[in-house]
Image: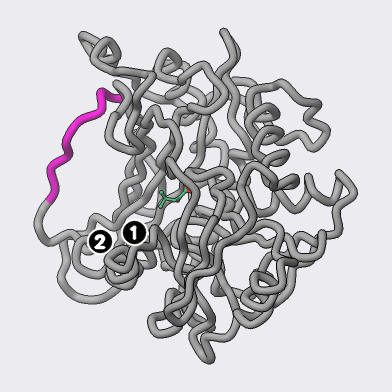
Amino acid sequence: MSTEIASIKITKVEASRIGEVDFDNIPFGKVFSDHMFTMDYSDGEWKNLEITPFKDLTFSPAISSLHYGQSIFEGMKAYRRGENIYTFRAKDNFDRLNKSAERMCMPSIPNKLVMDGLRELLKVDKDWIPDNESNSLYLRPFMFATDEYVGIRPSEKYKFIIFCCPVGSYYTEPLKVKIETHYTRAANGGVGEAKAAGNYASSLYPAKLANEQGYHQLLWTDSKEHKYIEESGTMNVMFVIDNVLITPPLTGTILPGITRKSVLEIAKDWGYKTEERQITVDEVITAAKNNTLQEAFGAGTAATIAQIEVIGHEGTNYDLPAVKDRELSNKLLTFLNRIKRGLEDDKWGWIEKI
Ligand code: COI
């Protein structure tokens, strides 16, 4: 394999917008760094690798992603400590992107191309990476179909982009979640395990109904019986019951989260008992009622560890133990924030110094 860096044309901004940003007060996903990485797919290959100023794009109204949703994305982050920049398990994100691509009938991307693009982008926009424990640079790689064709078939042309947003916390307070027993996020054989744009679009209406009832998010259940917990809106979900960390297994309907698998590996390493198994709504509600549900939290890239303080089910709200008393999830959050900034022994080889 060649170690040569892919050839990337770099055009920098004339004047950076960084001075306009209040880094102590960053809303999630609304502030964009100066540059982005783009490339195009046509005639069976990726080409036109470029870093350009972050800017609007022009497309035909007929591009197929707009009509039929051939569009996938990833969420990852870059971290900074002084002059050191780090990514966390970036290869795993790009492997997942390629799995999503396969399911959505889109071309795969050679790992080296995206990694080279990402590294160069981070070097160019280094100053946009916040240098503190709770903030980071959120990276949004995504690919969408660009054929100008209204018939249904896999597109022959695609665009891939990575842009960046300096971010703080995705959730600013512990969550109230509602167990959803009518609508479904994903069914067996569907696209639940792909990070497909449409999965998020279809979650909006049920989530809006839950918001109107005072909940931040949903806890999705299986499509057949609404009996088993699956995942939460933007994250995988985890419970500590009787000192065991339990999370639903990856059976095709759940997004295989990078934070999810990191949490499982860290908890095991710390000597906690972990179980990836089906967990019923009944089990969670019974544990909440008899005080054996010690912790409940979401795990995701944007959210990192998002504490759940209330679970709503069939009109009743169950209050969970105070967040400050939660041993494992608080410890996990601190450890994850530290390892991502090179402050813990990375015996797994998860971080890359750029
Ligand atoms: C992430 O955690 O990166 C996600 O993809 C969630 C996103 C929809 C905000």
- The residue tagged 2 is 65
Q: Are marks 2 and 1 in contact (CB under 8 Å)?
A: yes
Distance in Å between CA atoms under marks 2 and 1:
6 Å
Amino acid type, mark 1: Ser
**Residue 125: percent from the left, percent from the top?**
40, 18
Determine whether 46 is above or below 96 in the image.
above
- The residue tagged 1 is 71
Label 2 beta carbon less than 8 Å to ligand 1: no
Counting labels gives: 2
Asked if one can make out residue 154 in the rendered structure from this viewpoint, the answer is no
* Residue 132 placement, left or right of 107: right
Q: Quadrant of the C terminus?
A: top right
Asked if one can make out residue 314 in the rendered structure from this viewpoint, the answer is yes
Residues rendered magenta in the picture: 52-59
Amino acid type, mark 2: Ser
**Residue 66: percent from the left, percent from the top?**
20, 61
Front residue of 194/81: it is 81
**Residue 347: percent from the left, percent from the top?**
83, 33
